[in-house]
Image: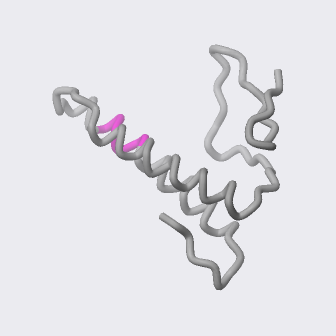
């Protein structure tokens, strides 16, 4: 199933399906759309850091994994910004 949001088409992944973070997806974004994504990533990162969970080793490991995935995604998006333009991170 595909949805359109803010001029961007997204293919929805069926429930229960898994997708590797290493799989690539090409999306053409304008600079404002890229800024929206970067802002959203900051929000998601903050929400992971503020989850009210007991800091067990399992919870901390899962949090570190999610934060590492977000950092990787942020780095990939920053590489898409033309040189000379500052990312609003």
Identified at 67% across, 70% down, the residue is 81
Q: Residue at x 67, y 82 (%)?
A: 83
Look at the magenta stretch and give its main secondary structure. Answer: helix
Q: Is residue 15 magenta?
A: no
Q: Can you name the residue that lies furthest to the bottom here?
A: 84
Colour approach in the figure: one colour
Name the side, left or right, on which 85 lies relative to 24. left
Image spot of residue 31 (x, y percent): 70, 64
Asked if residue 40 lies left or right of residue 9, the reply is: left
Q: Is 71 left, or right, of 5 in this rendering? A: left
Q: Quadrant of residue 9?
A: top right
Q: Nearer the viewer, residue 80 or 59?
A: 80
Q: Position of residue 54 (x, y in %)?
A: 16, 27
Residue placed most toward the observer, 70 or 5: 5
- Percent coordinates x, y for residue 17 in the rendering: 67, 20
> Along the line of sight, which residue is nearer the eye, 47 or 33?
33
Which segment is the magenta one? 61-66
Please give left or right for residue 87 compared with residue 71 in the image. right
For residue 17, above or below residue 38: above
Q: Which residue is rendered at x = 65% and y = 46% of the image?
A: 22
Q: Position of residue 51 (x, y in %)?
A: 28, 32
* Residue 65 on the magenta segment: yes
How many numbered circles are shown? 0
Residue shown at 27%/38% (left/top)?
A: 50
Q: Quadrant of the N terminus?
A: top right
Q: Nearer the viewer, residue 4 or 44?
A: 4
Which residue of the protein is positioned furthest toward the top in this rendering?
Answer: 15
């Amino acid at each position: 199933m595909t949805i359109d949001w803010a001029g961007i088409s997204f293919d929805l992944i069926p429930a229960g399906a898994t997708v590797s973070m290493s799989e690539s997806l090409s999306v053409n974004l304008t600079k404002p759309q890229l800024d929206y994504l970067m802002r959203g990533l900051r929000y998601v990162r903050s929400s992971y850091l503020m989850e009210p969970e007991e800091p067990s080793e399992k919870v901390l490991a899962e949090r570190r994994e999610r934060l590492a995935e977000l950092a990787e995604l942020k780095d990939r998006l920053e590489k898409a910004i033309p040189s000379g333009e500052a990312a609003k991170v």
